[in-house]
Image (tube, grey):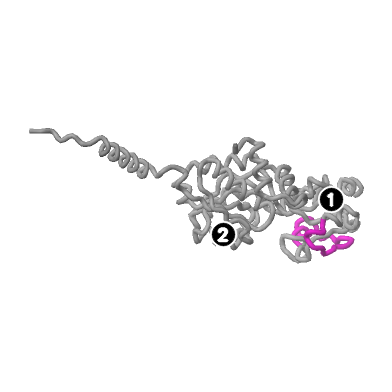
Amino acid sequence: MKKTIKPVWLLSVSIVALLALVLSACGGGAQSTVIRVGSKDFAEQLVLGEMYAQVLENAGFKVERKLNLGGTPVAQKALETKEIDLYPEYTGTGLLTVLKLPVMSDPQEVYKIVAAGYLEQFDLVWLQPAQMNNTQALAMTQEGSQKFGVKSFSDLAAKADQLVMAGPAEFQEREDGLPGIQAKYGDFELKEYKSVEKGLRYKALVEGQTDVVVAFGTDGEIAANNLVVLEDDKGLFPPYQVAPVIRKEVLDANPQITDLLNAVSAKISNEVMQRLNYEVSGKQREPAEVAREFLQQEGLIK
């Protein structure tokens, strides 16, 4: 019986087809996966969202940016409805705003409870949080802190009748604002509370129009003006550590994302985030440029 010899070109086509099948079965690698990265609508979130996106792109993922979505309810809803796959969120926000649980001050306990709650209720995973804490805060100039002898909330309560505070109007009414501080630290009365727009707070402080301003722990103006952030020595405010929150099914399919984004979180402290925020809010630089520069300096992207 005569053997049938296949033409060389037919063998080549068969080999190519076999290789295509093997690659298809393997999923084609990170390049075949599109990760949709979201963020809220302020400078810090835009920088963090860009960091996540650029690190993933550097590792070979295709990334679709859906940054500047809006506030927490919008970003959370986008995750739940699978419009995005991940975004940066704060542990305190997850605790109070999303899970609607009581205030807690221990960072590790807050993270543990939030991570468990998100997984159970929404099938979302919290990756490793950064050491930075963007909690609500009170700040003074170095000179003002020394003049009045105020370095903590307890000090402020003791000297309150000598101090003028500036901040948003709602801070006078919110439970986690002035009423909360008064309930925790004593029913003190300020010399005066001035309602000012967010963008004018630090200008009023530096120009001596107020002694204390309502702040957030990673505001860029804190580092730029070498301000003193008062210690919340009785733990009124919950911690607001930031971490990537990602849909579990996306993480299960792409487990390498964990190490990539945890490496970013490991580099972010209050001081680092204050500096990066000021590059955007103070120097009017693009978040993508600021993020890229930082990631390259830290060796996280090429």
Q: Earlier in the sequence, mark 2 or mark 1?
A: 2
The residue at 80%/46% (across/down) is 224
How packed mark 2 is, by other alpha carbons closer than 10 Å (few <14, some 14-19, many 20 or more), is: many
Mark 2: which amino acid?
Gln
Q: Secondary structure at mark 1?
A: strand
Image label count: 2
Q: Is 259 above or below relative to 248?
A: above
Alpha-carbon span between mark 2 and mark 1: 34 Å
Look at 73% across and 54% down and name the residue there: 136
Numbered mark located on residue 76 in the image: 2
* Front residue (pair 146, 247): 247
The foreground one among 74 and 166 is: 74
**Residue type for callout 1:** Met
* Residue 246 position within the rendered picture, expressed as x and y whole percent measured from the top left: 53, 51
> Which quadrant would the N terminus be assigned to in this image?
top left
Q: Is residue 94 visible to us here?
A: no
Q: Which residue is mark 1?
A: 140
The answer to whether residue 197 is visible is yes
Residue shown at the point (55%, 46%) measured from the top left: 127
Q: Is residue 195 covered in magenta?
A: yes
Q: Is residue 258 left or right of residue 188?
A: left
Image x and y of residue 264, in percent: 61, 41
Element carrying mark 2: helix
Marks 2 and 1: which is nearer the front? Answer: 2
| Magenta span contains residue 193 | yes
Q: Quadrant of residue 22?
A: top left
Front-most of residues 1 and 153: 1
On the image, the x and y values in percent for residue 78 come to 54, 60
The reply to whether dot 2 and dot 1 touch (C-beta < 8 Å) is no
Label disc, if present, on residue 81 of the rendered structure:
none
Q: Which residues are magenta?
A: 179-201
> On the rendered image, what quadrant is the C terminus found in?
top right
